[in-house]
């Protein structure tokens, strides 16, 4: 397992507020349409069109998380979520920590303008994102045996898919994002494949493929209620389980790369 040196950009309070301003926590109708690209603060412009979001090479390390192109396209009765990276996709995974508390998660993420209710979460509860994740210290897909060894509790290191709801972490001065917690006594709407963890996190059985420079997840359109259109972006990030196992349980610890440079959701999925 390769060792990762995190050199990413931690989201600040300003960035978290920027998500709100950009419509990332708003309804699909308020999402930023694609088509012109956006500056990323480094003089780059990230081209966005219906074919995807193109990002400059070499602005993120390690290369396995340096986004080059991010897209979501219709393919018959499916949506295909794709991220292409400069290095070999999935070649870097978290080091085993030895316990659930304090362990790390690495991820390829597609934030969207879809309301969380599209997949079964409470409406308006945050930013719905699809993610491919790896975390060797725990398994959060209890309904599936991904490596087909007869056990369903030892597959966390294998890249697999999740829907998550992201919100700003108000417990920290830097405004890092987190996967929304389910508070004690709270009874939110949850997808039928929710794995029973106290998080707005779903574990659908979507095929997750990593091949050379590409990460790809196929999602049935029916699972999202056949949306007419929505906006998206691409992110690679490290997350960490709180060592105290308290709220926030799972927060974004480092943002490695952002396809648009500013989380403006310039990608657009149309009617096809």
Image (cartoon, rainbow, N blue to C red):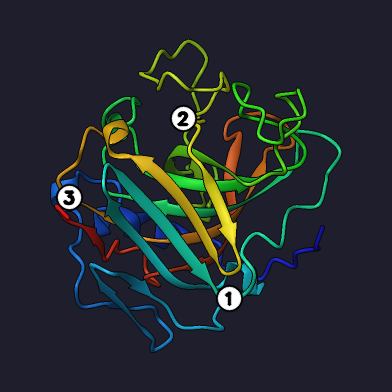
| Contact flag, marks 3 and 1 (Cβ < 8 Å) | no
Which x, y percent locates residue 40?
A: 38, 78
Which x, y percent locates residue 179?
A: 50, 39
Secondary structure under the numbered disc 1 in the rendered image:
loop
Q: Does residue 30 appear to the left or right of 213 in the view shown?
A: left
Q: Is 239 situated above or below 7?
A: above
**Quadrant of the rendered image containing residue 81:** bottom left
> Taking the image as drawn, is residue 11 in sight?
no
> Taking the image as drawn, is residue 43 in sight?
yes
Mark 1 closeness class: few <14, some 14–19, many ≥20 residues within 10 Å: many
Which x, y percent locates residue 156?
A: 70, 37
Mark 3 closeness class: few <14, some 14–19, many ≥20 residues within 10 Å: some
Query: Quadrant of the image for the C terminus?
Result: bottom left
Secondary structure under the numbered disc 2 in the rendered image:
loop
Question: Which residue corresponds to mark 3?
Answer: 229
Q: Is 19 situated above or below 228?
A: below
Q: Measure the alpha-carbon separation of dots 3 and 1.
A: 30 Å
Q: Residue furthest right?
A: 98
Q: Nearer the viewer, residue 207 or 181?
A: 207
Question: Which residue corresponds to mark 1?
Answer: 60
Choose the circle earlier in sequence order: 1 or 2. 1
Mark 2 closeness class: few <14, some 14–19, many ≥20 residues within 10 Å: many
Mark 3 or 1, which is nearer the eye? 3
Secondary structure under the numbered disc 3 in the rendered image:
loop
Q: Residue furthest top?
A: 185
Query: Quadrant of the image for the N terminus?
Result: bottom right
The residue that appears at 19% across and 73% down in the rendered structure is: 35
The residue that appears at 57% across and 69% down in the rendered structure is: 213
Question: Which residue corresponds to mark 2?
Answer: 200
Mark 2 or 3, which is nearer the eye? 3
Choose the circle earlier in sequence order: 3 or 1. 1
Q: Measure the alpha-carbon separation of dots 2 and 3.
A: 23 Å
């Amino acid at each position: 397992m390769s060792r990762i040196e995190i050199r990413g950009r931690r989201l600040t309070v300003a960035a978290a507020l920027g998500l709100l301003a950009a419509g990332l926590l708003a309804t699909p109708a308020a999402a930023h349409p694609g088509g012109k690209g956006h500056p990323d603060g480094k003089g780059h412009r990230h081209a966005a069109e219906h074919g995807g979001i193109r990002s400059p090479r070499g602005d993120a390390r390690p290369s396995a998380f340096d986004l080059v192109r991010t897209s979501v396209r219709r393919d018959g009765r499916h949506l295909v979520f794709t991220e292409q990276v400069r290095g070999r996709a999935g070649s870097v995974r978290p080091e085993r920590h030895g316990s659930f508390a304090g362990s790390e998660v690495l991820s390829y993420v597609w934030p969207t303008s879809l309301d969380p209710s599209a997949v079964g979460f409470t409406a308006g509860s945050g930013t719905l994102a699809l993610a491919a994740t790896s975390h060797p210290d725990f398994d959060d897909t209890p309904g599936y045996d991904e490596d087909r060894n007869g056990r369903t509790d030892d597959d966390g290191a294998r890249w697999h898919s999740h829907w998550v709801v992201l919100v700003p972490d108000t417990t920290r001065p830097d405004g890092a994002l987190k996967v929304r917690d389910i508070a004690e006594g709270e009874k939110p709407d949850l997808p039928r494949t929710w794995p029973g963890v106290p998080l707005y996190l779903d574990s659908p059985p979507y095929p997750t493929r990593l091949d050379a420079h590409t990460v790809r997840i196929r999602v049935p359109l029916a699972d999202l209620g056949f949306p007419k259109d929505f906006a998206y972006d691409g992110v690679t990030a490290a997350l960490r389980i709180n060592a105290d196992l308290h709220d926030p349980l799972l927060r974004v610890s480092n943002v490695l790369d952002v396809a648009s440079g500013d989380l403006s959701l310039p990608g657009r999925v149309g009617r096809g």
